[in-house]
Amino acid sequence: MTEGKVIANRSEIVFLYDIKDANPNGDPMDENKPRIDEETEINIVTDVRLKRTIRDYLSKYKEKDIFIIEEIKNDGTQKTREERIKEKNIKTAEDSKRLLSEYIDLRLFGATLALSAEKKAKGKPEETTEPVREKGKSFTWIGPVQFRFGRSLHKVVPQTIKGTSVMPSKEGMTKGTFIETQILPYSLISFYGIINENAAKSTGLTEDDVKILFDGIWNGTKNLITRSKIGQAPRFLMNVVYKKENFHIGDLDKKIKLVPNGGKKDKEYRSIADFSLNANDLIKTLENNKNSIERIELKIDDDARFFFAENKEGGKKEFIELLKGKGITIAEFTFN
């Protein structure tokens, strides 16, 4: 069940993570290759991929009930969303509203759920059935937490790795099958998101839910240990919480650039040690809007390095101290 106070403040999220010798988000329509903007050579990761990372972490590591998740039946097939709705006996607006109190992913990201067709409620929902909106034979919640597609902060170059598969039988082992896997040697990916306080009223998103969300962003990325995702590392997570109603700065992710170390070009990056994060524009923007900011929540990896004005450099400590020196309240995330 949901607990705590519904959030009252809008906030903006910037999340950076990197991946080495792996595929951050394969495109099933293109042989599961990494998603690349062909014109700019920028790596793209969908918001769906990040949301799945969060859901998987909250389910596996935090034992949270997740509604939109892969669930395998006894016959080996995947349970459909319609089957889950039927199991939950979702026939009216009040029934669908009940789901919000049970499933954190619905409170975070929203959903469109079809009613059980055989007993669909007739007419418009009563006033008491808010916060859902009836639309034909379904109910839709606009998720308070929305992310844009993640994009690398530098150009990437995919590589094709050739090999052979291992067969389970002796006969197969002598033959084998040639396979090709496409990976990225390195990619630093930036995600931008907003938590909308108005939509939060509709889904009942609480302050406790938001704390769990950020745990899922950071540790979900860190603990996504599969063949194609192993090696992901969260590097920078910032949540700017505002005082003003219906206000946010916007595009904070675009205020961070990369400064190469050792003369390397962006396609030559192979680790976080190959560049520094140029935070000048970000710091200036936050300072210019500090009267509208209640606090900034941060978690920064120890290996992240920053380039400041006047050719000064530093790490996590220097970045936090600089923001505090501008009169901005800083709260570090407490999850491990």
Image (cartoon, helix red, strand yellow):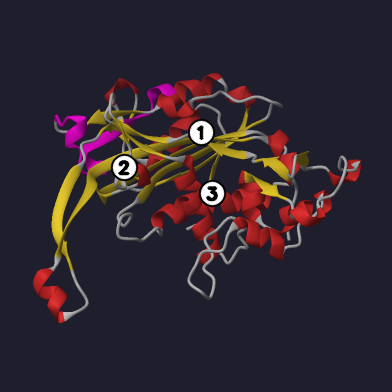
Q: Which of the labelled discs sits on residue 332, or is there none?
A: none
Residue positioned 19% across, 79% down in the render: 169
N-terminal label among 3 and 2: 2
Query: What's the residue type where badge 1 is placed?
Result: Lys
> Which of the marked residues, 3 or 1, is nearer the chain's N terminus?
3
Residue type at the position of mark 2? Asp
Label 3, label 1: how far apart the Cα atoms are:
22 Å
Residue sitting at x 51%, y 53%:
54
Mark 1 = which residue?
324
Give the residue furthest to the top: 288
Q: Nearer the viewer, residue 335 or 102?
A: 102
Horizontal relation, residue 46 to residue 273: left or right: right
In the image, farthest residue toward the left: 174
Instruction: Name the residue tied to disc 2.
Output: 30
Task: Name the residue beneath numbered marker 3.
Answer: 214
Does residue 25 appear in this view?
A: no
Q: Is residue 270 visible?
A: yes
Is 264 included in the stretch rendered in magenta? yes
Could you tell me how far apart the alpha carbons at marks 3 and 2 are, in whole angstroms? 31 Å
Looking at the picture, does residue 3 appear above or below residue 26?
A: below
In this view of the protein, which residue sits in the foreground, 22 or 308? 22
Labels 3, 1: front one: 3
Q: Nearer the viewer, mark 3 or mark 2?
A: 2
> Which segment did they paint magenta?
263-281
| Left or right relative to 93: residue 279 | left
Could you classify mark 1 by the number of other residues whose Cα lies within 10 Å: few (under 14), some (14-19), or many (20 or more)? some
* Residue located at (49% from left, 39% from top): 238
